[in-house]
Structures are given as structure tokens and as C-alpha cells.
Image (tube, rainbow, N blue to C red):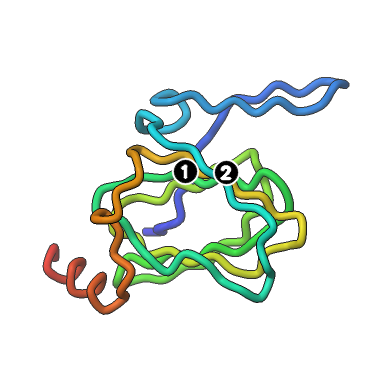
Amino acid sequence: MSIIKFLELDSKVDNRGYLGILESTRHIPFDIKRIYFLKNLQSDIPRGFHTHKKLIQAAVCISGNYEMILDDGKNKESVALNSSHSPLLIEPLIWHEMQNFSHDCIILVLASDFYFEDDYVRDYEQFLRMVNEEI
């Protein structure tokens, strides 16, 4: 079973361009409480390196491309993201790392809760202990 999960969104396309639609609890499987974005990323400086205890996120590659590595403690998968048509769902207790950003990469992230530092696990060994306790 893949840990890479994409969400479907509505869109309208005509001669004026593309309109992507993301609605809380319709296309995104949670109430959106926080929205943030990443831009001006350095291709040789990876980001992420953490998991969340409870937070759910949907990452949308608005422009450019990058690579996301997802890890559930047993399986590790990598996916190239380059389309705003398919947001990537990042569930709790999925370690994630981002790398190989294009110069024009912009990532929009929708989150299920406000920022709480206590929800972050930034130590990989601690993450592995947490997921192994749940088995």
C-alpha cells in the first residue's frame, strides 16, 4: 500500500486559463485552519525533516517542481511534484522531506490546525520509536 496519496480537486478550464478549486471538507478532507506557502527555495537545501503527531496537511505545487519523500517508519517513497492539479495529502506520523526545488517552485500548504510546536517531531529516531509503539 502506497503512502503517497493525492487529492482530487475541481477545476474549470477555458480559453482564459485554469481555475483550480480547493474547498475545505469537500476536496480537502479536513477543516482548513492554516495556510502557508514556501517560495525562493534553494535547490540544494532540503527542507522538512519532521512529522506531525496530529496535523494533516495538503501540499499543492503552485509553480515549478520539487521532490517529496514520505516515510511511515516502514516504507519510504519519493514522488516528483509539479502540478497544482493534484494536492499531496500528508497524514499524521508521516515523516516528510522536500528537495530538488526548481528555481520557480512555490508550494502552498493547507493545514488542519494552527501552528503548535508540540505537534512537531523533528528527531527521526523519536519518530521511529513513536510509529513502532503503535504497531
Name the foreground residue: 32 vs 17: 32
Position of residue 47 in the picture relative to residue 3 (left or right): right
x%, y% of residue 27? 47, 28
Which image quarter holds the N terminus? bottom left
Tell me the quarter of the image containing the C terminus. Answer: bottom left
Q: Which image quarter: residue 120?
A: bottom left
Q: Where is residue 48 in the image (x, y as percent from the top left)?
A: 47, 64
Using the image, tell me which numbered label, if any, was put on residue 58.
1
Name the residue type under label 2. Answer: Leu
Q: Residue at x 69, y 57 (%)?
A: 40
Q: On screen, 2 above or below 75?
A: above
Furthest residue to the right? 15
Compared to 111, does 41 lie above or below?
A: below
**C-alpha gap between disc 2 and disc 1:** 8 Å
Question: Which three-letter amino acid code belongs to the residue tagged 1?
Answer: Ala
Disc 2 on helix, strand or loop? strand
Q: In which quarter of the image is residue 74?
A: bottom left
The residue lying at 59 percent from left, 25 percent from top is 21
Write down the residue under mark 2: 108
Say whether disc 2 or disc 1 marks the residue closer to the N-terminus: 1
Between 112 and 78, the one lying in front of the other is 112
Where is residue 6 drawn, in percent x and y? 50, 45
Residue at (70%, 25%) from the top-left corner? Answer: 19
Residue most extreme to the bottom: 125
Is any part of residue 45 visible from this angle? yes
Residue 79, horizontal then vertical, whole percent: 56, 62
Q: Nearer the viewer, residue 67 or 113?
A: 113
Residue for point 73% across, 53% down: 64
